[in-house]
Amino acid sequence: MNPSHPSADDVLARVRRAGGRMTASRRAVVEALLAGGHHVTADEIVARVSRDHPEVHRSTVYRTLERLETIGVITHVHLGHGPSTFHLADPPHHHAVCASCGAVVEVPWDALDDLAAELHAKHGFELSPQHFALSGLCTACRHTE
């Protein structure tokens, strides 16, 4: 299997290794998360779970997302002015979002290391950018202006 596209069983194995229980509701949330692509909102996950598993309550989906984030299986990011989106935590990465077309670029985790070191050395500031996207223009939009 492609490591960038784990199965629900792979993700649930990580949950078990972190001390979490494997429940039908958690499986439904993980499957909905994986089916949604790289970055999906909680409401998109709720809609998928409700469609396929109407017995799973909305609050259960939100609690499951919170638990998955607490144990490091998923993380959330604010990609702009809309709601937070969720994605698998591995591999860790940052996000850059085009302010014109909304394209999302996954940026390698170490891309901000020099900036983080400089902020720390010069200002004593500890950078924590993992939950927010960098904003700018993608190549296509830069060339159309």
Image (cartoon, helix red, strand yellow):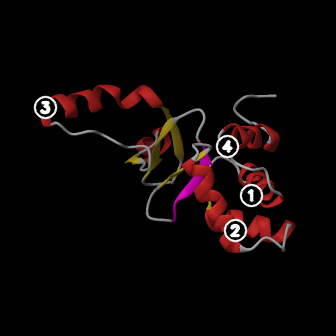
Disc nearest the viewer among 1 and 3 = 1
Residue at image position (63%, 66%) is: 62
Q: Which residue is mark 2?
A: 60
State the residue in front, 123 or 37: 123
Above or below, comparing residue 7 to residue 78 in the picture? above
Q: Which of the two residues, 21 or 115, is positioned nearer the viewer here?
A: 21
Q: Position of residue 116 (x, y in %)?
A: 28, 32
135 falls in the magenta region: no
SS class of the residue under badge 4? Answer: loop
Residue 128 percent across, percent down from the top left: 35, 42
Q: Residue furthest front?
A: 19
Front tag of 3 and 2: 2
Give SS at disc 3. Answer: helix
- Rounded to the nearest whole Å, what is the CA distance between mark 4 and mark 3? 40 Å
State the separation of the CA atoms marked 4 and 2: 18 Å
The correct choice, above or below, for 54 with respect to 9 in the image is: below
Residue 19: mark in rendering: 4
- Given residues 18 and 83, the one toward you in this image is 18
Three-letter amino acid code at the position of disc 3? Lys
Quote the CA–CA distance across marks 2 and 1.
9 Å
First in sequence, mark 4 or 2: give its number. 4
Quarter residue 2 falls in: top right
Tell me whether circle 4 and circle 1 mark residues in contact (CB < 8 Å): no
* Furthest residue in direction left, as rendered: 122
Q: Are marks 1 and 3 in contact (CB under 8 Å)?
A: no
Instruction: Tell me where the magenta segment starts and ends, as one range.
Output: 83-88
**Image quadrant containing the N terminus:** top right
Left or right side of 36 for 63:
left
Foreground mark, 2 or 1?
A: 2
Q: Would residue 135 be found to the left or right of residue 90 on screen?
A: left
Q: Is residue 132 left or right of residue 71?
A: left
- For disc 3, the marked residue is 122
